[in-house]
């Protein structure tokens, strides 16, 4: 009994930590979820289900993360555990992961095909191996964001890393990669380009409402101490957002995406500056309110459609709205932060 008492204590703690972790995965307050609910009221359940399926597929990866990663590596190394106790932890801890039980249930379900079981096991294994680790280590891919010209280089790179650590980005990336595959296979009609673009931009639009959400108290203090004007701080956020929008829209309608992205930022500045809301990495971002979401979603889709279907010159109007918003809320940052 002495050989299992310490691992059992650790496993009980891990079970509580895993339960708390699962409670942080929520779609509520995200623009893509609001859009799915709106589609349900518009009697289009297929489209609503497709959006919720996209979000569900993305959330599988962090849900599949290794429970033992909740324990800092240094602490795990210094704990007085025997090798047999460490092996016991390694064997039992995966069963604290809900995706392990899902895979087992599929394997036991007679109607589930072998391909479905292998796919579920592969996705769960990918999340178990690759998700939930530190994003600050030297080997992290997020550390390999390329250098950029100009004095805002490091600030923009930091903001890019923040956006790349949101599930919103991975939703947009899933749509973009799927569109690229369909285009290469010749299966994507021209009429579907902007609708898919709109969904990809909706996927990341909540990030434009929560530009400072991942900074934390220490990050906000650093921003206040920087010798930068308010519009420069906002621009560093915006350029990171626009770079992500550009990347996601490469297989889609690039002009429509940039028009939608600039309008999303122009409207999102108010909520980001006046009603900042703390966010979590590797989670879906949550906007301040339904009203802020609706005030952003409708104009950004209308702007993107106008650019895509009418004239790319309308990008100048979208860019003008973004520049005015950048200047106005940059002044508010100068007034309230300093």
Image (cartoon, rainbow, N blue to C red):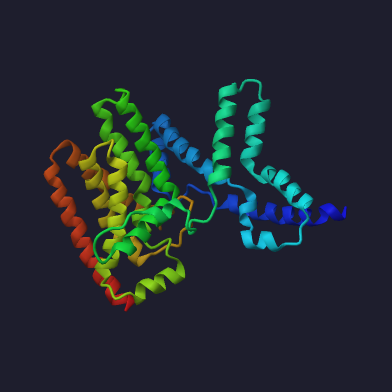
Q: Where is residue 102 in the image (x, y as percent from the top left)?
A: 63, 35
Horizontal and vertical percent for residue 7? 77, 54
Q: Is residue 165 left or right of residue 22?
A: left
Q: Which residue is drawn at 68% across and 60% down?
A: 77
Residue found at x 29% / y 51%: 243
Q: In which quarter of the image is the C terminus?
A: bottom left
Which is nearer the eye, 129 or 328?
Answer: 129
Seen in the picture, residue 116 relative to 195 is either above or below; the reply is above
- Quarter-of-image position of residue 185: top left
Residue 291 shows in this picture:
no
Is 312 on the left-hand or right-hand side of 25?
A: left
- Does residue 208 sit above or below 50 in this rendering? below
Q: Residue 26: image x %, image y %?
A: 51, 49
Give the farthest residue toward the right. Answer: 1
Numbered label tally? 0
Whole-percent x and y of residue 274? 34, 66
Residue 202 occupies quadrant:
top left
Residue 60 seen by the camera: yes
Give me the residue at 27% from left, 56% from top: 239
- Answer left or right for 3 relative to 322: right
Pick the front one: 6 or 168: 6
Could you tell me which residue is drawn at 53 percent across and 45 percent down?
A: 130
Which is more toward the observer, 242 or 150? 150
Q: Identify the image quadrant of residue 80.
A: bottom right
């Amino acid at each position: 009994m002495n050989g299992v008492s310490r691992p059992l204590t650790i496993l009980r703690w891990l079970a509580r930590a895993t339960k708390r972790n699962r409670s942080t995965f929520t779609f509520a307050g995200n623009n893509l979820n609001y859009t799915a609910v709106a589609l349900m009221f518009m009697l289009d359940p297929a489209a609503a289900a497709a959006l919720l399926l996209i979000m569900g597929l993305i959330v599988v990866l962090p849900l599949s993360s290794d429970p033992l990663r909740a324990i800092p590596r240094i602490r795990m190394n210094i704990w007085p555990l025997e090798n047999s106790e460490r092996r016991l932890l390694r064997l039992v801890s995966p069963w604290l992961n809900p995706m392990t039980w899902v895979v087992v249930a599929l394997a036991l379900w007679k109607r589930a095909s072998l391909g479905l079981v292998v796919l579920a096991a592969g996705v769960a294994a990918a999340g178990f191996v690759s998700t939930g680790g530190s994003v600050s280590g030297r080997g992290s891919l997020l550390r390999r964001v390329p250098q950029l010209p100009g004095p805002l280089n490091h600030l923009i790179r930091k903001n890019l890393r923040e956006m790349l650590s949101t599930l919103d980005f991975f939703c947009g990336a899933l749509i973009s990669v799927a569109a690229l595959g369909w285009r290469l296979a010749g299966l994507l009609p021209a009429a579907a380009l902007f609708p898919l673009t709109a969904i990809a931009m909706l996927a990341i639009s909540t990030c434009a409402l929560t530009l400072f959400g991942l900074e934390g108290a220490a990050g906000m203090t650093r921003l206040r101490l920087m010798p930068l004007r308010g519009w420069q701080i906002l621009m560093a956020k915006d350029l990171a957002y626009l770079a992500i929008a550009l990347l996601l829209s490469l297989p889609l309608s690039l002009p429509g995406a940039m028009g939608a992205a600039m309008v999303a930022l122009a409207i999102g500045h108010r909520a980001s500056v006046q009603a900042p809301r703390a966010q979590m990495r590797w989670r879906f971002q949550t906007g301040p309110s339904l009203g802020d979401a609706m005030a952003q979603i409708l104009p950004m889709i209308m702007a993107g459609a106008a650019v895509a279907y009418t004239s790319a010159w309308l990008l100048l109007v979208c860019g003008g709205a973004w520049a005015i918003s950048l200047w106005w809320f940059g002044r508010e940052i100068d007034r309230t932060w300093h």
